[in-house]
Image (spheres, rainbow, N blue to C red):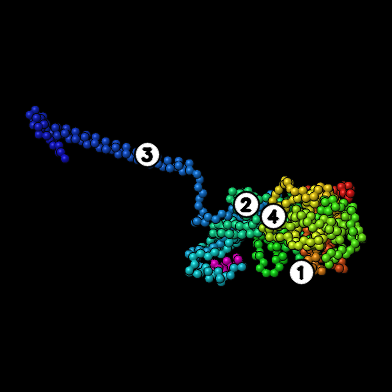
Amino acid sequence: MVRTPLRPLPRILDARAQGENPQAVEREMLRVRREQARDIGRKRAEWRLLILAVLFFAGYAAIGTRMGLLAAAPVIEAEPYVGEQIADARADILDRNGRILATNLVTNSLYAELRYMIDGDRAAAELARIFPDVDEDRLAARLTDPDRSFVWIRARLSPEQAQAVHDIGEPGLLLGPRQMRLYPNGRLAAHVLGGAGYGQQGVTAAEIIGTAGIEHRMDARLRDPDLADVPLTLSLDLAVQGVVEEVLGSGIEMLNARAGSAIIMDADTGELVAMASLPDFDPNDRPAPPVEGDPTEHPLFNHAVQGVYELGSVMKSFAVAQALDLGLVTPETVIDTRGPLRMAGFSIRDYRNYGAELPVSEVFVHSSNIGTARLAQMIGIDRQQDFLRRFGFLDPLDLEVTEARRALPQFPERWGELSAMTISYGHGLSTTPVHLAAGYAALVNGGRRVVPTLLRRPEVQPVEQLVTPETSRQMRAMMHAVVERGTARMAQVEGYAVGGKTGSADKPNPQGRYYDDRVIATFAGAFPMTDPRYVIVVTLDEPSETSGEQARRTAGWTVVPVAAEMVRRIAPMMGMRPQSDAEIEAAFSLR
């Protein structure tokens, strides 16, 4: 470093020679040096401020750029709690009028974190008071086990139970929010809905999966996250379903029947407006499947779609319709009804003696087994099989409930002439009430095949023509005659033209024969028969009407009044105007 002298000698000597004060030279030199130092400090400060300003600008620019990039980036959903990636969304189920049949409800699960537990024995005692089914000693052992850190206690709680658990005040008892499936109408339409349960579970989420009924069959649709906000609309009418179940239940109780089913189907679209099976259950608390005993006696058994029965004389409608459609007979054609009719060592008899001959219309009205068997002989085996197959009687149902595909119609492997004759009047072919309803819909709607469905289908789908409109008209007239003066006279409902056919099929016993005093009683028909809109099928298992001296089990005394009460109550609800007797009478004539 070069040192600048504070008092340069040449200038001092020169100042003395001229008589000046040498101290002034020193002061001047000091001033110059201070000014130089000040200039250097100012420049250094200016550079520091400039660098600091650049750094601040760069920092704010980086922050602003990052904020802009985040704002422009696509939204990313927040991750679920602690790795629980469980989808619990499930679409609502509605009836045809938008009323809720099934929905999701926020509830809580209950679990224990033992690291926070203060008094496990007290917590177990309090929980046993809230949940009577809890084993207090076993729970206490789990809550005080030093080798445990987590205890799962309850999958779901009601709001009252959740509050009671909260009031215990135990920090180790924790509630986890989750969804549950709720059926707000309880038992109503239980077999249609089926029920749902939990699949994969975590403490704050649970996967809801269908376990039976439409909940199981349509599970993929209901769990689709893209359709979670789009309800699944069924064909059921909740109000009609309620009336049908109420009347069916009263009929079962009054007639001491083991079980029963009832179906109301739109004759044009195949929509099931009501489908009931009793006994039933509450899908909010679905019972466990049976592991022993007769499954048909369990509440989970759906008699409408799982009940495969010989349905008796209701099947005569198809034999008569086929004979008319083939042009083999007319309603006036006389049929030999002398009996018994013997075939291959088997005797076919009528319930009572109807005389030596009857026209086809009277064979149907009086339900002659012999006359119907004669028609089956005229039709032939191959044509009968083809006809029943086209009506769907030989194939499983493709209905939107899981149980339907498991019910297989039963018929002889060797379909000979005797089988053809017995099948014509309802013995030898076992099928379900829904099969029967679809068949009757085709007979009364002008001959068009319908496909049964539980989904809303407001428009008629293009389908196969099974019989001609003229055959359908003739069948409607004969079915109405059965109610007016035949075996179903108790089905008459004032203001509504009801038509149909009765069936009383003996029940098979385990020994391979038939019971003498047990029947499946069925009424299958439609209303109003002047322009059929709905098909009705009601079935009772082992009914018995005991108001007289002897028990009466035939359909005319048992199931027919139950069906009539259903029509009487639901027809006005479904917007049908009552007709006068003159209007009804003018609409029918057998030609």
Residue at the spot of label 1: 512
Marks 3 and 2 close (CB-CB < 8 Å):
no
Label 3 or label 2, whichever lies nearer to me, is 2
| Residue sitting at x 65%, y 59% | 212
Q: Going by the picture, which residue comes out furthest to the left? A: 17
Label 1 or label 4, whichever lies nearer to me, is 1
> Looking at the image, is mark 3 or mark 2 earlier in the sequence?
3
Label 2 or label 1, whichever lies nearer to me, is 1
Residue 221 circle label: 2
**Residue type, label 1:** Gly
Which element is circle 3 on? helix
Q: Position of residue 304 (x, y in %)?
A: 73, 59
Mark 4, Cα crowd under 10 Å, few <14 / some 14-19 / many 20+, is few
Q: Name the image quarter holding residue 345.
A: bottom right
> Looking at the image, is mark 3 or mark 4 earlier in the sequence?
3
Q: Which of 435 and 563 is in front in this view?
A: 435
- Helix, strand or loop: magenta stretch: helix
Residue at the spot of label 3: 57
Q: Which of 454 and 80 is in front in this view?
A: 454
In this rendering, position of residue 105 left or right of residue 332: left
Q: Where is residue 249 in the image (x, y as percent from the top left)?
A: 76, 61
Disc 1 versus disc 4: distance between alpha carbons? 30 Å
In this rendering, position of residue 68 left or right of residue 254: left
Q: Nearer the viewer, residue 397 or 286?
A: 397
